[in-house]
Amino acid sequence: MIHPGKLIVVEGIDGAGTTTQIERYAEHLRQKRRVVRITREPSQGPIGTMLRQALGGRVQLGRAHHSEIMALLFAADRLHHLATEIEPWLRDGAVVLCDRYDLSSIAYQTATAAAELLERVDFEAWVRTLNRFALRPDLTVIVNVTPAVAEARRRLRPGAPDIYEYSELQTKLASLYRDAERILPNDRIVHLDGDPSLDEVSAALSAVLDPFVLGQ
C-alpha cells in the first residue's frame, strides 16, 4: 500500500509506558498542526474486544493450544484493524501512532508457547507468516525497560493484572524485544531507553520521530 501518511508503531513490555508516550507525542504533533490518530492492539473491533476479554481472564480460549489460538486471533484482528482504521487514516495523510503491532504477537505468543511445541515447530516463523499480509510500519520504536522497573510501574496501575503480566514472562519478552532486528529483519526499528523519567523518555522519542515525521 502506497499512502501519504505515516504508520509509527511503539512497542515494549507491559509497564514500558508505550501508551503514555504515544499520548504525549500525539499532543506534540497536534501542536505542530499535524493530523494524528492514536490506535492500539488489540483493536476496538469485534475480534479485538474478544482478545481484551481473554487477556483479562474473562474469556477462556482453551489451554491446550492457547498460544496458537491467540496468534491466529491477533493476526485476524490486525487485518481488520488495518482495513477499518489504520489504512483509511493513512490514505488521508495522518500520522497513525499504534500502540503494539505484529512484533508483540511474535514476542508474546512465542514466549508463552509450550516447550514441546517449540521443539517441533519454528513457532516464531509461523506467527510471522500469519502476519505476512500486514502493512509494514514506516518505523517501529521499542521502549526498552528493565523488567524490575516495568513491574514497579505495573503495580501502580488500577485493576487486576492481565494474563501476561507476570515477572518471568516479562523478562523473556524484554529479551525478545531487544532482539527485534532479528525477528523482523526488514523493518526499520529504533530502540529507546524507557527507564528514565517520563519527560526524559518523551524528549528522546521526539528527538527520534520529529525528523522522520515532521522533517525537522
Image: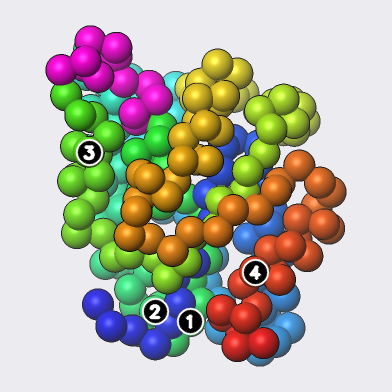
The residues tagged by marks 4 and 1 sit, at their Cα atoms, a distance apart of: 18 Å
Magenta residues, start to end: 109-120
Residue 39 visible somewhere in the drawing: no
* CB atoms of marks 3 and 1 within 8 Å: no
Single out the mark in the foreground, 3 or 1. 3
Three-letter amino acid code at disc 3? Answer: Ala
* CB atoms of marks 2 and 4 within 8 Å: no
Q: Where is residue 37 in the image (x, y as percent from the top left)?
A: 52, 72
The residues tagged by marks 2 and 1 sit, at their Cα atoms, a distance apart of: 5 Å
From the viewer's perspective, tell me whether residue 168 is left or right of residue 185.
right
Q: In which quarter of the image is the N terminus?
A: bottom left
Disc with the residue nearer the chain's start (2 vs 4): 2
Label 2 neighbour load within 10 Å: few <14, some 14-19, many 20+: many
Single out the mark in the foreground, 4 or 1. 4
Disc with the residue nearer the chain's start (3 vs 4): 3
92 shown above or below 77 = below
Label drawn at residue 90: 2
